[in-house]
Amino acid sequence: MGETNMEQTPVKPKREMLNYINVFRGLAILLIVAGHTMQFGTKGTWINDTAFEILTGGTALFIFISGFLFQHLSDKFEYKIYLKKKWINVILPYIITAIPGIILCFTMPEAYGNPFAGLNPFAQIGIFLTTGRVHNVPTWYIPMICIFFLLADLFIILERKKILYKFLPILFLITFFIPRVDIEPSYLTGMSYGAKYFAYIKYILNGFIHFASMYVLGMYFSSFKEKIDYCYKYRWILILGMLITTGADIYLNHTFHIMNNTISKIFLTLIVLGYLKHYDNEIKNCNWFNKSADFVAKYSFSIFFIHWYILFAFNQIFKVSKVISVNSVNELFSAIGIVSIRYITVTLVSLGILYILKQLLSKLQVKNTRSIIGV
């Protein structure tokens, strides 16, 4: 009887991570760190506009991967279990790794850029955690991605009814016509605390609306993985599209202060996806590269959580600004050198700290280090 029951309810094999998506995840976090560490050029110049266009926007790739992996694992989707896992593996490490940023907001409010300094400390903590942007700039992504988590059941229902992907053209139009807004503490001068908080909430909602197309696009290519081959087949068309949209965005930003670099990153996403899948076997056979990419990919979420702190420390120690100004050819070469060193330092120090922390937690017999530091 026991054997019969087991035959009737076979255990589903665990869905493995696709190697090309794993490598993609590693490359995406490297682009995100580059966007935060390699900014140079005096504001309003062609150099600054070009650097900003090319190096920033890695969030689009990260969101695409999130959508891809969500659909890839959706065959065993159960809403309550899904939310519980997200709480353990995303929200908890987010809260724990927020501690250094919160301390910096309280102890170095001006240098760190805390527009809520002076407000009740507990209210500040609530604001920091629900917006992400203040205490740890890149982690505005967490409140935004939580909206996707909460809507997960709706995404699954729409996909299974074969409705979801019909919305892609509309979602792309939204991405095109509703670019990301910018927000810095200096923009909020003179506002009440409530108005400032509302501005950050609008920033989160804007991100969700703007990037919804990338999330659903990730789901689409996960659902129809064979279509990824077309990304490689028509790679030259995609490359041309990326170059045109990149050039157009640089021009529009410089001339009219209108910017939407997600458009060029859509092309970049499809190009990288196509190449990685096409050369997947070659990448697997290149042992050193595949292992390196896998290592970075495993630590990608953790790097995302802590690299801003390392960047802040680097800037404070070496007395350099977040964006290195350029007013001459000599300064250009100097700036490129500084941001390159900063990028390498922030990446390696982040990886080193996380590796040591993971080893220490493992020696302390912590079973799920991912719930603490994200890996």
Image: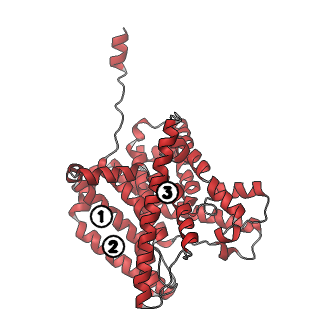
* Residue 29 left/right relative to 195: left
Amino acid type at image mark 1? Ile
Q: Residue at x 51, y 46 (%)?
A: 357
* Residue 192 left/right relative to 310: right
Mark 1 surroundings within 10 Å by alpha-carbon count, few (fewer than 14), some (14 through 19), many (20 or more): many
For label 3, the residue is 304
Q: Of callouts 2 and 1, which one flags the residue occurring earlier in the amino acid sequence?
A: 2
Percent across and percent down for residue 41 are 47, 83
Q: Of callouts 3 and 1, which one flags the residue occurring earlier in the amino acid sequence?
A: 1
* Residue 224 left/right relative to 108: left
Mark 2 surroundings within 10 Å by alpha-carbon count, few (fewer than 14), some (14 through 19), many (20 or more): many
Q: Secondary structure at mark 3?
A: helix
Q: Would residue 181 be visible to someone looking at this image? A: no
Q: Residue at x 54, y 76 (%)?
A: 320
Q: Where 88 falls versus 196 (above or below)? A: above
For label 2, the residue is 242
Q: Quadrant of the N terminus?
A: top left
Q: CA distance from mark 2 to mark 1?
A: 9 Å
- For residue 134, which quarter of the picture? bottom right
Q: Are marks 3 and 1 in contact (CB under 8 Å)?
A: no
Percent across and percent down for residue 319 are 57, 75
Q: Secondary structure at mark 1?
A: helix
Q: Residue at x 56, y 58 (%)?
A: 139
Q: Could you say which is closer to the camera, residue 313 or residue 79?
A: 313
For label 1, the residue is 271
Q: Nearer the viewer, mark 3 or mark 1?
A: 3
